[in-house]
């Protein structure tokens, strides 16, 4: 079983008698239904509903929680959580006494430490929380974990979507359990709820298949129209942010999608429920000529 020290991740600890109540009213996931050892996927949003940072979220103990966060987002997230705290009886600190490892693949021995299921998708495996000295003895082959993630079509913040400029639906957080639509208010909730119930996101992150080497940042086109951009790449496959309406029109009109000279195929990840059934959708061009 690969056990990879995720050196690009860091932890924030939240503790105190009002930690659960406070966090439940601030972040996108449901905190109050968690038992010790449970995990969630969530985010802190701006009041306008855009992602400040996403994270995996663990209940370490009674009234004690851990945020598993991209290392470059830790300081900003910590500052913003403290800003929202006001008089709530909850304390936040960097958990420098802990590190994070990704555990995936076939079963095998792992170092001791709490294991949390990755709540986004079972195939991702688990997260192991352990002392930094122990983590330092593990492989730090982040490329291996990246290949695993990309093969499952799981987006990564900062690579596949931009912090501060992306709604949860555009990052597929609604598909990966990152937003609880029944829990009530949290920062940015009204905007996210409106997108869920009144509109279809124009942009989505989807899987891309291709038969020749491609690079992150390459534009995906249909003829002379931009359809999207590659955001993560591994051998033969990747993730791209895509304008669904333009991709649908191209498919309906028989226009191939390309990244440079390489033809690509867009595919819905197996965990996704949003529609990508191109053959059954009517293109915008068809609607125009049919007067729909």
Image: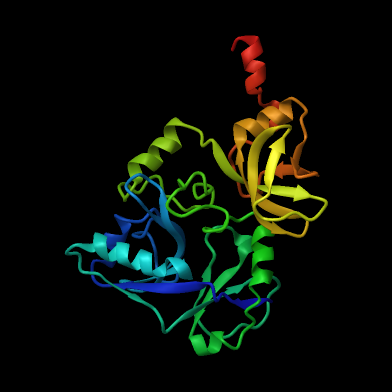
Q: How far across and down, in percent of the image, does residue 234 sit?
A: 72, 60
Q: How far across and down, in percent of the image, does residue 161 sit?
A: 53, 52
Q: How far across and down, in percent of the image, does residue 121 sit?
A: 58, 58
86 or 218, which is in the foreground? Answer: 218
Residue at the far top: name it: 291
Q: Is residue 70 among the parts visible in the rendering? A: no
Q: Is residue 250 among the parts visible in the rendering? A: yes
Work out whether 74 lies above or below 264. Answer: below
In what quadrant of the picture does the C terminus appear? Answer: top right
In what quadrant of the picture does the N terminus appear? Answer: bottom right
Residue at (74% x, 25% y) in the render: 253
246 or 129, which is in the foreground? Answer: 246
Choose top left, top right, bottom left or bottom right for residue 291.
top right
Q: How far across and down, in percent of the image, does residue 212 sit?
A: 82, 53
Residue at (50% x, 72% y) in the render: 9
Choose top left, top right, bottom left or bottom right for residue 238.
bottom right
Query: As drawn, is 15 to the left or to the right of 258?
Result: left
């Amino acid at each position: 079983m690969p056990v990879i020290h995720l050196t690009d991740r860091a932890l924030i600890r939240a503790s105190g008698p009002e930690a659960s109540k406070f966090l439940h009213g601030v972040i996108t996931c449901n905190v109050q239904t968690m038992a010790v050892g449970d995990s969630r996927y969530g985010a802190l949003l701006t009041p306008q509903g855009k992602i400040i940072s996403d994270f995996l979220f663990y209940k370490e103990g009674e009234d004690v929680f851990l945020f598993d966060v991209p290392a470059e987002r830790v300081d900003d997230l910590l500052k913003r959580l403290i800003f929202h705290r006001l008089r709530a009886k909850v304390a936040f600190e960097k958990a420098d006494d802990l590190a994070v490892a990704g555990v995936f693949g076939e079963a095998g021995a792992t170092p001791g430490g709490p294991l949390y299921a990755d709540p986004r998708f079972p195939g991702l495996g688990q997260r192991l929380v352990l002392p930094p000295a122990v983590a330092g003895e593990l492989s730090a082959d982040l490329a291996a974990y990246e290949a695993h993630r990309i093969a499952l079509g799981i987006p990564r913040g900062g690579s596949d979507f931009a912090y501060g400029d992306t709604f949860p639906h555009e990052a597929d957080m609604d598909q990966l359990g990152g937003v609880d639509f029944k829990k009530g208010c949290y920062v940015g909730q009204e905007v996210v709820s409106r997108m869920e119930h009144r509109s279809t996101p124009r942009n989505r992150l989807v899987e891309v298949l291709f038969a020749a080497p491609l690079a992150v940042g390459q534009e995906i086109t249909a003829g002379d129209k931009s359809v999207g951009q590659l955001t993560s790449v591994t051998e033969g496959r990747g993730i791209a942010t895509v304008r669904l309406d333009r991709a649908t029109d191209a498919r309906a009109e028989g226009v191939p999608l390309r990244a440079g000279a390489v033809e690509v195929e867009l595919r819905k990840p197996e965990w996704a429920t949003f529609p990508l059934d191109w053959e059954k959708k009517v293109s915008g061009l068809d609607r125009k000529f049919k007067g729909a």
